[in-house]
Image: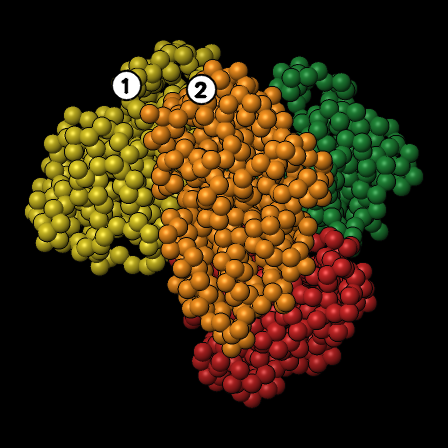
Chain colours: A green, B orange, C red, D yellow
Amino acid sequence: MRHHVGIVGYRGYSGAELVSLLGRHPHAEPVLMEHRTDAGGESGLHSKHRPRQIAATGDAVRGEKIEIVFLATPAEVSMDLAPVMLAAGARVVDLSGAFRLRTPENYARWYHEPHTQPELLAEAVYGLPEFCRERIPKARLVANPGCYPTAANLALRPLIEAGAIDRSAGIVCDAKSGVSGAGRKPSLKTSFSEVTENFSTYSILNHRHVPEVLMVSGLEERELSFTAQLLPLDRGILETIYFRAANGAAAEQILAIYEKRYAAEPFLRIYKPSHAPDLHAVRRTNFCDIGVTLDTATGRAVVVSAIDNLTKGAAGQAVQNMNLMLGLAETEGLL
Amino acid sequence: MRHHVGIVGYRGYSGAELVSLLGRHPHAEPVLMEHRTDAGGESGLHSKHRPRQIAATGDAVRGEKIEIVFLATPAEVSMDLAPVMLAAGARVVDLSGAFRLRTPENYARWYHEPHTQPELLAEAVYGLPEFCRERIPKARLVANPGCYPTAANLALRPLIEAGAIDRSAGIVCDAKSGVSGAGRKPSLKTSFSEVTENFSTYSILNHRHVPEVLMVSGLEERELSFTAQLLPLDRGILETIYFRAANGAAAEQILAIYEKRYAAEPFLRIYKPSHAPDLHAVRRTNFCDIGVTLDTATGRAVVVSAIDNLTKGAAGQAVQNMNLMLGLAETEGLL
Amino acid sequence: MRHHVGIVGYRGYSGAELVSLLGRHPHAEPVLMEHRTDAGGESGLHSKHRPRQIAATGDAVRGEKIEIVFLATPAEVSMDLAPVMLAAGARVVDLSGAFRLRTPENYARWYHEPHTQPELLAEAVYGLPEFCRERIPKARLVANPGCYPTAANLALRPLIEAGAIDRSAGIVCDAKSGVSGAGRKPSLKTSFSEVTENFSTYSILNHRHVPEVLMVSGLEERELSFTAQLLPLDRGILETIYFRAANGAAAEQILAIYEKRYAAEPFLRIYKPSHAPDLHAVRRTNFCDIGVTLDTATGRAVVVSAIDNLTKGAAGQAVQNMNLMLGLAETEGLL
Amino acid sequence: MRHHVGIVGYRGYSGAELVSLLGRHPHAEPVLMEHRTDAGGESGLHSKHRPRQIAATGDAVRGEKIEIVFLATPAEVSMDLAPVMLAAGARVVDLSGAFRLRTPENYARWYHEPHTQPELLAEAVYGLPEFCRERIPKARLVANPGCYPTAANLALRPLIEAGAIDRSAGIVCDAKSGVSGAGRKPSLKTSFSEVTENFSTYSILNHRHVPEVLMVSGLEERELSFTAQLLPLDRGILETIYFRAANGAAAEQILAIYEKRYAAEPFLRIYKPSHAPDLHAVRRTNFCDIGVTLDTATGRAVVVSAIDNLTKGAAGQAVQNMNLMLGLAETEGLL
């Protein structure tokens, strides 16, 4: 038995990754859902084994008995489509930032536009399974986490909860992402000749993913310095996180916190002391890899957190959420 | 004494390269000429040592005593601006394809639009110094050659002239270019995530640079198979050229033809037998490097020709033409 | 039921790709086989889901009931290990060039060393399923094809068989490969700073893969001009093949030959007229994609053939051969 | 009049950059000095315009009247060669780490080998002209600064001197470098397929460049968290530096400190508030570009410092030092 699932925005990079992952999923039958905002050539879709295509409408959802619709669309499109899909009886996993924050006010502050669906915002469940696993199975609307916050929160929250960080000294999150994180729409900033042999910073201290990190980690805005940076590569996020360990903790103690918290997590891998992941280690996987280096004498600590921005940072995590929503094994189709 | 020279299209890659080359030229004083078609952020221009900026108008040309205007603009803009600049008393080096072919009919066939300046087309001098050096010093309008044809013609014409190629078997020119050759305007085809870790063909057998190769080399269209291809790198063109040597020639004889023809040329470098250039050898230089491999028993020959598409393939060759037009040493500012 | 299969050379790029493909294969249980020639860090192997490790010896083959051993080793190591593995009762898929050619003399000419296992060479079955499918199921020793020859022969042989090529004019195969094709041993030629923003030719007219192309396609050496070239990317092979069509054939007729010949082939995809594959289309797949462009008036034809050098060009094809040897569906674990 | 200058280690990346810069320098006549530790193919050196080659011996220094010898060699080779060159009457600019630190003990701690020339270590002048300009003109032995410390110290020292940093909260320097910084010797870590589409950390908290940062900036070891990281590109260093501003300083005040300190410096460029440099801005230049972002309410500050590791981080700064040593204009050959 295969569950019918629809993908809106399948031409974008996250959407195309969903098509690829769901095409190999043993219990899903993906369908491409065409929406007027889609444009441009297709990515990674060939005639052999290409899923069927329907309209991104409520009628199509009912007609095709779509159980879950993935919205790999900009936030403003997701705010338009989510109520339509829900009204037609589908459940929704939204990959945009539309339903991640808790209040319309916070959304308006960071996304610079009013939120048009405050009731759905209130209903939406934040889809980071490692910390929100209980509510996801029955959720109608799951807000799939942002790529940067996924890597940051999986690294920060266990330490914050354990009181292992001296928050008074501030936490630095120096984040680097591949270009696919900026989406598929052509722009000068993501043109090949501008990016190759280059490295640049953007949204220093004011990236729209900051409130998601604060919301999940429990940090205050004044405690966190976050910088986003563009790597000359296609996919992957690596965050180098700096803090001062509380109470003279040693690296082994920090690692022990992670190992205990993530012992049962299938997608978290903790490295041996003084080892750190790189982007090849997580490429095209749903893993989040974490390594710790700490100078015990001074308490200076460096945590490295790495994911694939299109997998654990987007489509892979969306499939992980789908598995939970459909009562399947959480790792189905993802190992 | 510095000659005042203007650059239209200075934000594009060829234009920015002109700004860079002319900024270090001992006898030129470059001026940026602003034109409404210019758009987007700037490339490689910083506040220190940035040239002055004027309008791309006849009045500005007269007011600033501009002697030569470089048009690093699309062909249709060059057809508009060239007569204006000439009427204002400047001479013009046009880097577009507007004035390279001999007839309006041929232009219309390959550029898919009518030519609006047939008299200027008739007057224009093709600016490949190695083969057209005599007419350039007195030319009012120089058509700077295309990037692909420069590499192809410097490799092919000496052998065609010497009768060293068995033309009945056909000549293959398999051409590869870096992304900057496609210009700076954002497009999906030149987006980083589409290009990195990719390699693709385009304009197979019908690239608009084909008629330039035929015009200069003397080949017939049916004799030449030309394919353009996109390399995942910023700058450089390498063409692998295949033919059958006439009359059982050996590699040494082919090399001897090149060495004799190019003995006095400052920008041509011929490699030892069985050695071939790569793109690093010519990067950010005005050299055209050529290597020959030949199987004497069968006559199968491979010539490799490499240039930097923004230097010898565009801005560098334009400065070489300027040097000739101004009576300067041809290599001034280019070594 | 899972078949026990061993991988020697699992730290190299082809070997690591085998570990990855076989780790997801529903009917295979991969085991890493340690051999003294292995060296250097590991690639893409993490502690979670890592296969067991045994010695690359006959005893281990018997003890672990290994049915098939993959040799992802240099040719000289494969000549040493293949008889050992066969004597221990395993069947062998060898990914090196050791057993691909038909005679020890031809091997010595192209590999510059004597062949030490002439009887095994005589017994070995060339593992290009699309043309040698009948003998593979019962073969003890399968010689997995080279990467360049796979792309070339899948493009050339149907046309040669159909008499669609005017062989008197010669055939050009301009081949480009990603860096992983050169193996994982560090060398200056494959160092990052030498390769990035570069493109270079090598083994012009005398690459050791030439005899494999001749052997399978049926061409004579004097008819084929083959050049290997290094792309600044990790994985992928694209070959641009030029010839003159026999008897004024049109592109549609060339396509019809491919479509008929490959109608039942699961891993061949033929493009519409004037469309051509790029490397992204085949990346991390076992497909060989083929496109045709032809100028009917002159008969100049260009065929583009693309594969992933580590998949259809190495590990994927090896798994395809394993599937045939074990009586499994040929596409098992490969779609 | 051209000064004769010798380059040992001209095949490495810093050495080849010296050959390139000095080849265009109006007052220098570079000579290649062959040393047995040199190996491997050459980089960027072609037969046209190639400098002469001599032995790296004292006799050759005397015979060729070499005034300055650049040692672009490993530290242990520099310790051997520096006394030889000095004894022969040349002055030395050493690009290795051999003579940068103040004591043999500190050298032994960070370089894990004893220092064999403690007297020369005591005599050596640290060659960061922006802070050590006075002693360089008369120095016999100049220790050219490391690449990471150059970018870090030019950003940090003016702020430390001005008391603009709350040092109690610690300073984070998240540093990223292109691959050429690792030198030209082949290794798995710098192989193309390992680096492309990858990003990795190394030497977290214990990079050998840390003591240079401490020595020049005046920070204590416990105050600085420094991580080195490898970018998938050839050349460039970008450091993202985080700290808390002292006394509620605003971004404008931080900028004012830089602008005042660097007003007369030809190679320092300070960006407007909230603007930051990228690597293209400094590529193949001797500039160090600095940008500042600061949240006044909380004092969280981010300074971005960018250089080309082979120019201002190595060969360019070495030529800047040579200009000072020879009494030439400091920018000669560098703009």
> Foreground: C311 or C242?
C242
Residue B145 in sight: yes
Please give the name of the residue rendered at 80% of the width and 28% of the height, measured from the top-left corner: A81
Q: Amino acid at mark 1?
A: Ala
Give the class, few, some or many, for how many residues have Cα within 10 Å of label 1's Cα (few <14, many ≥20).
Answer: few
Residue C72 in sight: no
Q: Label 1 is found on which chain of the structure?
A: D
Q: Which residue is mark 1?
A: D264
Depth check, mark 1 against mark 2: the one in front is 2
Q: Label 2 is found on which chain of the structure?
A: B
Please give the name of the residue rendered at 45% of the width and 12% of the height, measured from the top-left corner: D296
Vertical position of residue A32 compared to residue D305: above or below: below
Q: Amino acid at mark 2?
A: Lys
Picture quadrant of residue D171: top left
> Foreground: A240 or B67?
B67
Q: Which residue is mark 2?
A: B65
> Foreground: D54 or B168?
B168
Q: Is residue D71 left or right of residue B121?
A: left
Q: Is residue B204 left or right of residue D304?
A: right
Q: Are marks 1 and 2 on the same chain?
A: no
Q: Secondary structure at mark 1?
A: loop
Please give the name of the residue rendered at 74% of the width and 45% of the height, measured from the top-left corner: A19
Q: Residue D290: x and y, percent? A: 39, 24
Please give the name of the residue rendered at 79% of the width and 62% of the height, measured from the top-left corner: C250
